Image (spheres, coloured by chain):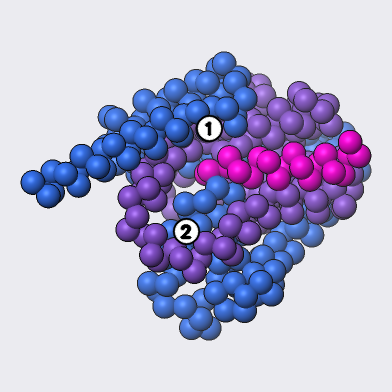
Chain colours: A purple, B blue
Amino acid sequence: MPILIELFVSFFLVAFVSFGGASAVIPELYRIAVTEHGWMDARTFTELFAIAQAAPGPNVLIVTLIGQHVDSWLGAFLTTLGMCLPMSLLVGLLFKHWDKLQHWRWRAAIQLGVTPMAVGLVLASGSLIAHSADPGLIGVLLLLFTVAINLRTKLHPLWLILLGGVLGLMGLV
Amino acid sequence: METEGWLSAEEFNILLGLCQFLPGPNVVNLAVAVGVRFCGWRGAVAGATGLMLGPFLVALVLGVLYGRYGELPAVQSMLQGITLVGAGLIIATGIRMGLNVNNRAIYLPFAAAAFAAIALLHWPLPVVMLGGATLTISLSWWRLSQEAKACRS
């Protein structure tokens, strides 16, 4: 299959299971890009993740960067489109009827059921990334500090990212 | 939306509910929902493009810089620090989502099972998601039916 079509189709399919957004499907993105297609090594994947975190904008940018790494701006465009298109189409079709479906029992059942799965997926994503970064003791402390600060305070995440970058530059993590 | 008065708060909440219900990037879904509500498919395209174009271009520039300077040791150590913070932010998001789940004693074991299947056993995510969600959705359907019965009697 030509690589551009492969890029588009892979991420188009991921979109259907990405309950919890792009953060939930990082293990699957890793499987596609590193394990299955060998588009990049594990270190590059982790570094693209870091860039996507630091970049302003939605988490889905990790998908953009994977596409760009494989095939420049056209690859970036196709992976981003693939990831955003399926549910955008569904939103377009569903939105007119959504207020009627508000009280539909299946809707509530799906929402209640999918959330715990998304929780497991998001936590698995975080642990996979942490594991692949292979941090030292200070690195682990930085991660735990980030979790605590983000849960307990309203500090903007950008400050934590800045802290991570500085500690990294100092060679501490 | 507040400044332009395009939507009432109630309409916004309904659309937000739809977007959180569907998989995929929530913010993109929301931009599409608001766009389509006003100008049909052209509004949807405009909404999604308006939201994504800036971040997309910034990501491309960062990607190019990474391609050029990514091998430098200083860049790599900086990205290592950012990676760990990023992982921490995602874990915090997961914990926050978990704390917001109702009936945690019933549903969180499924979250733990999904975590173990992906992070420890490395099972394919679509299989875990579809298999697990079938179980959890059936369970919550059954519970909702019981509740409805209890209300009636």
Q: Is residue A13 magenta?
A: yes
B9 lies above or below A24: below
Res B18 label = 2
B32 lies above or below A57: below
Q: Nearer the viewer, residue B79 or A124?
A: A124
Write the residue at 60% across / 31% down: B126
Residue B70 visible to the viewer: yes
User: Within 10 angstroms of label 2, few (less than 14), some, or many (20 or more) residues?
Assistant: many
Q: Main secondary structure of the magenta part?
A: helix
Q: Is residue A30 left or right of residue A139?
A: right
- Amino acid type for the residue under numbered disc 2: Leu
- Amino acid type for the residue under numbered disc 1: Met
Write the residue at 51% across / 81% down: B6
Q: Earlier in the sequence, mark 2 or mark 1?
A: 2
Q: Secondary structure at mark 1?
A: helix
Q: Find disc 1 in the rendering and name its residue.
A: B129
Write the residue at 39% across / 60% down: A101
Write the residue at 43% across / 59% down: B17
Region rendered in magenta: A1-20
Q: Residue A130: image x %, image y %?
A: 60, 28
Quarter-wise, where is residue B125 in the image?
top right
